[in-house]
Amino acid sequence: MQIGGVPLATGMVAKDEKTSKPAAIVAETASQLIDDNAPAPDREKLIEANLRKAAEIIPLMAAGLPEEYGSKEEYRRIPWIWRVAIAVGKSGDVENIKAVLKASLPAAENRLEHWQSVVIGGGLINGLTLAGHWPDEVLAKIFDGDEPLKTAWIHTLTASSAMANDKTVPTGTRYDALRIVALQDWSLAKPQLEKYLQKGVHDELQMGAVSGLADVRDPHAAEMLIGAYEYLSAHNRKLALEGILREDAKILLTLQAIENAKLPAELKKNEMVLKLREHANAEIRTQAELVTQ
């Protein structure tokens, strides 16, 4: 069987009579998902119908790639690999996320492939954030008690830091790597995220820093976003504001920054800020009323 004109690796499809049919269906699904001639709506339906099999499908979508690092063929497939991964992340299904991580994290002796960075950073981590979860909390539960998986994760953190700085890697994939970098120990993540938050940095890399900092619980991460807000693009400003309004301590920092003119006065009329007048926290409600009056 082939995927995208490339033969599947030996052993990818089970030969046992009892398992060959399900395995063949999974392989066919993977093949259709990376078939550029297949209509996008049909492929989206395939993802939805087979999401619980993502850990089997994703490696097959990446099977048989050229040895070349970040090949043209890899990037042809990546958009749909990403769609599967982000759907898993958004689902918040811890068991499925763990299965995809097991299928996608590189072993300690292996390099971090571009598609793996996309799956982990742009897919799972990004998807968890979009669904309102804190990726570090979800992943901590997943790694608890699973030493082999934790070891692969630690290797991935180091590899993602190097990938984010690699100028030969496309900026979109470096964005994905920065999403992973943000889940390192704060003392390690801070300087690298700060580097890509600076004025004049490529917008997509800056977006990686902004989104990564939004996933960090430390108040200093919010302070960094507040300090950079003025020179961010409109899209990155929106991401930054969403990030600093995710929890009470950061919300209060944000309202104080608006009051003290460290953030633009126009935010007093921003829909997300105005909504804080109805927040469950009485202190936030009171501060929001004062700031937005």
Image (cartoon, rainbow, N blue to C red):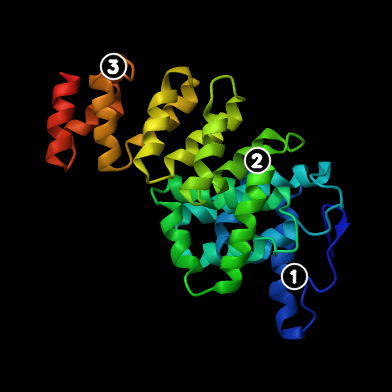
Residue occupying the far front of the picture = 187
The CA span between labels 2 and 1 is 36 Å
Q: Amino acid at mark 1?
A: Ala
Q: Circles 2 and 1: CB distance less than 8 Å?
A: no
Q: Circles 1 and 3: CB distance less than 8 Å?
A: no
Above or below for 197 versus 44: above
User: Where is the N terminus found, in terms of image quarters?
Assistant: bottom right
Residue tagged 2: 164
Nearer the camera: disc 1 or disc 3: 3
User: Where is the C terminus found, in terms of image quarters?
Assistant: top left
- The x, y position of residue 37, in whole percent, is 77, 44
The kind of secondary structure element at disc 1 is helix
Residue tagged 1: 24
Residue tagged 3: 261
Q: Amino acid at mark 3?
A: Ala
Residue 12 relative to residue 268: left or right? right
Residue 123 relative to residue 29: left or right? left
The kind of secondary structure element at disc 3 is loop
Q: Amino acid at mark 2?
A: Ala
